[in-house]
Amino acid sequence: MPYRAAEFAGKGSGLRAWGQKQRLLVAGAVTALLMLALWLALPGLLAASWTQQLRALGYPQAALAIDDLGWTHAVGAFSLGGEAGADGFEADFTPMGLWQGRLSRLTVRGLRLEHPLSLTSPGLPADLPLAGPVFFKDARLSLALPGGVGTLPLTLDASFTPVPDGWHGEAKGILALGRTGVPAQFTADWRQGALTAAGFTLDPTQGGPRLRGQGQARRLADGHWTGTLDVAATGLPDGLPDLMVKWENGTGVVLLDWNRVARFTALLDSNVHGKRRLNARLNVTEPAQFAARLGRPDPGLIGGRVDLNLLADGFTLEDWPRTWPDLAIRLDASGIGLGKGPRDNALSLGAVARRIDGTWWLSPLADQPGRLSLPTLGLEARGLQLTGVVSLPLDLDLDLRAASLRLPWLAPSALTAKLRGDPGSDLRVEWKATNVDNSVNLSGFVDVDAGGGRLLANLSPVYLQPGDAARLFPGAPLPTGLSGTVAGRLTAGWTQNHADGAADLMLENVGWSMQGLNVAGVNGVLRFDRLSPLSMPSQTVAIGLFDPGIALTGGTVGLSMGGDGVMRLVPTPFTWAGQSVSLTPTSFRIGNSYVDLRLDVPATPLPDVLTALGVDGVVSDGTVIGSIPIRISATGARAGDGALRTVGPGRLALREGAALSWLAPERNDSLALVARALSDYRFRALALDFKDGERRLSLSGANPSLYGGYDMPMNLRLSPAPASTTVPAIPAEISAAMAAFKARRD
């Protein structure tokens, strides 16, 4: 029995031992699986962590991938967004360093950055996750040239080594200039993330571009920079200027020369108080070529000279380029041609520029108001002042004011304008000109882009009383008695090779008086579908009264003009003496001093004719017919040879007691005898003519009861007829065109 018990006890111990082994095996297998899963997931976790670190460096579109991961080594590539990124990288680390997130060595191949390197590029972050050196192989970058004159491609190998509180960098590369390029060497030091020292050497190869120089600079404890710079270049390719740059301990000079195109000079020295002074000047003699050299769109300026002056005085370089001094800027341009126009345009404008939070704020330059002159357009603006903001790359948000604006045929006005956008690619100018009493308002905008631009100008309705025209539109060929409402709209567009536009002029109840001519009730919209050459499609305006001595009412005139400069007039019938009378179609060339018309009067009862001429108190019979030529010029209207004549004999009989009020007493003799003769006058012929601004009634005949019926021819001068009070209705299509014009809001 004891033996059996011992046997069973031994077997139980073996089973327990086997169970423990099983548990150990299972735990080991699970641990191995967990370690395997962690190892398989580690590349993705590291890639995500390093991607976040790249994004924290200022590349929000960064993405990194790991292709191979070992215990102390990782290989992969990354993108920084767009075309920026690296062809590959190799990272070395220790297990503890990897746990702490720090690399012991990093090599990056084929680095590409989106923005060019410059002195104002951000410094290195002070907490980079690196404990060892960084190497760049075949980095393909670009270097920003001073003054925004362009960039140079740069291929280099570089190394960055950690030093106490920062990094030390060295690089060798090739500036991609010409066929061979220019070898370059660079050094730089950063402390606590800020650049504290830099240097370079340029040493051209035999037969390569003639670019040579060296420079070194270091930042002093007080924040000032000291050092030397000496660079010279001639005959550079790719449109780059000849240059000479010298700088030593805060004093320097820069010269950039685009042969026969532009020249830039800048001098930095000290004033009498020991503060810094900058005097820079840019002279451009070929604006279009200069824009092309800078890679900017063609500004459409031909010839002339553009001078830009910058002056800053009494500042220090302690925080430059993070902070800038105030700049006094003056732009002078003369002899400039716009497109293919005359080279007689000029502009002078000054401003003070202050840099705040990376943007430039402009204010007017004291005691130096600007001026703009465009003689071809008859435009001159004086007292120009500029305020607003300029952001870089070039983006304008400016307000422009002119104390006095002069335009052809417009009284002196004040101008306000807003400039928004990039002048080289997308600029909008919104403007408004108002005369002294605010009775004339011009407004509109100009849009300019790389391919051309467009313009809109609106003339708000102007309400004219007789005499206003000469005051509001001095020098314009307008009658002094012009009255009514006038409004207009002009649009224009242009490209580098073509320019054209259109215009609308609305007339509402317009009228005017000239010698020998009264016009009233003119309504319609005159449409010019082209401005160069000037042309008008076929259209119609209504004329309530057209009175060249004969008061015609309720007609219309069709107008059209092709590109030949010939205006064609097609009047529709007017009403006179109860009849439809017509003005014959005619044409004249713009610029002619006169236009000839002919009035044709059909057979009309004599009583109606006399009533229309204001001859009252007379009983008459007979029929009148005829034609009257009319010449209209800038000074008035004049009837030519021609008359209205009766068809056959007739009778005139003055009613008993009727006065001869329709005869001009100062122009007629023996009115008493005339009254006796007209008591029962039998005429063989009667004629009405309107020559020399007078209305004459010529009679051949006699009064049978006077002097035995002796023949008594008479030549009577009529008084002016009373003004017509009839207001004809405006045709529906003309009213609709006027309503559409008023409804437009562009």
Image: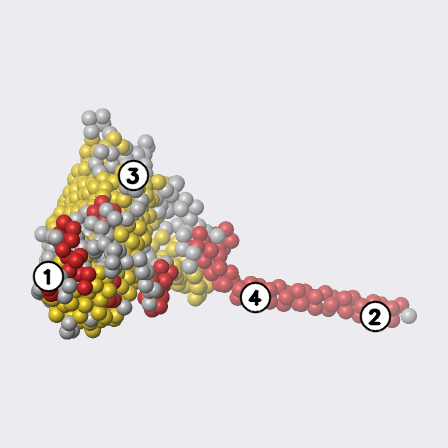
Q: What element carries label 1?
A: helix
Q: Please, what is the three-letter code of the amino acid marked with disc 4?
A: Ala
Which disc number belongs to residue 37? Answer: 4
Circle 1 residue = 707
Q: Please, what is the three-letter code of the amino acid marked with disc 2?
A: Glu
Does the residue at mark 1 contact the one at mark 4 (Cβ under 8 Å)?
A: no
Front label number (1 vs 4) = 1
Which disc number belongs to residue 515? Answer: none
Q: Earlier in the sequence, mark 1 or mark 3?
A: 3
The answer to which of 222 and 651 lies nearer the viewer is: 651
How far apart marks 1 and 3 lie (CA) works out to 95 Å
Image coords of residue 542 (percent x, y): 28, 64
Front label number (4 vs 2) = 4
Front label number (3 vs 4) = 3
Does the residue at mark 2 contact the one at mark 1 (Cβ under 8 Å)?
A: no
Residue at 22% across, 57% down: 721
Image coords of residue 289 (percent x, y): 15, 56
Q: Is mark 4 on a helix, strand or loop?
A: helix
Does the residue at mark 3 contact the one at mark 2 (Cβ under 8 Å)?
A: no
Q: Is residue 524 left or right of residue 342?
A: right
Image coords of residue 106 (percent x, y): 38, 55
Q: Please, what is the three-letter code of the amino acid marked with disc 1?
A: Tyr
Q: Is mark 3 on a helix, strand or loop?
A: strand
Neighbor class of circle 4 (other Cα within 10 Å; few <14, some 14-19, many 20+) is few
Circle 3 residue = 363
Q: Which part of the image, by quadrant, shows the C terminus?
A: bottom left
Q: Earlier in the sequence, mark 3 or mark 4?
A: 4
Neighbor class of circle 1 (other Cα within 10 Å; few <14, some 14-19, many 20+) is few
